[in-house]
Each structure stands twice: as structure tokens, then as C-alpha cells.
Amino acid sequence: MSGDARTERERRWRRHLAAWAASGLSQAAYCRRERLTANDFSWWKREVARRDRGAAPAFVPVRVTPAPTAAYAFELSLRDGRALRFAAGVDPAALSAVVRVLEHSPC
């Protein structure tokens, strides 16, 4: 099987796992609805968790400088030149969610 096919299969299962988590269904009910085997689903659930644990964080060195304006408290600069600006009262849970997304995406 080619690398592209393996990558696409993993993406497909990641989509299934996300859809299952959002569905509120039991694993068995989701598998019945989507016509998936419970064994395959369980294997991919464990495999994706294992792969995610082994993934190296995609963080890069950070330089902290004072914000040029009072409009935001700090800025996170991405590799491609884009920036995320945060207010002083940013919700820690929201910031944590942003970091989790950035850890798993090629920014």
C-alpha cells in the first residue's frame, strides 16, 4: 500500500473518530450506523491515540516583546508570518484549545 493510501486511510479514520465523539452515540451504535466493524474501530481508536502520543510538538522558539498597542496583551507569531493576538483576559481553556490545534497542524 502506498504512503498516500495509508495517509488517506488514517485521515478517514480520524474523521470517523471525530464524528463518533461529536455524535453522542456509543461506539457500537456509531459502528452500526456507519457500517464499520467494531474491531477495526477499536484498533484505529487505539492506534490514533498511540500516534498522537508519539508526535513531537510542533513548537518553535518564542521571542517575547512588549505589545505595540494596548489592543492586545500578547501575540503568537506563526511561521508563515501570520499572528494570533490575545487580550489580557483570554480564556485559558480557549487558549489551550488553540495550542492543541497548532500542535497537530502544519502552521
Image: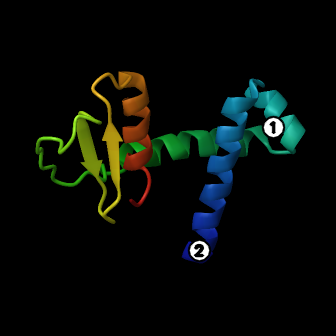
As drawn, the label of residue 31 is: 1
Tell me what residue is drawn at x 81 percent, y 37 percent: 31
Where 92 falls versus 77 (above or below)?
above
Residue named by callout 2: 4
In this rendered view, identify the residue nearer to me: 68 or 105: 68
* Label 1 or label 2, whichever comes before in sequence order: 2
Spot occupied by residue 58 in the image (x, y as percentages of width and height): 31, 53
Residue 55, relative to residue 7: is it above or below?
above
Kindly state the secondary structure of the residue where label 2 is placed: helix
Numbered badge on residue 104 = none
Q: Nearer the viewer, residue 84 or 68?
A: 68
Which x, y percent locates residue 18? 65, 40
Q: Quadrant of the N terminus?
A: bottom right
Q: Residue at left 79%, top 29%?
A: 28
Judge the density around disc 1: few (<14), some (14-19), many (≥20) Cα neighbours within 10 Å.
Answer: some
Q: Residue at x 35, y 46 (%)?
A: 84
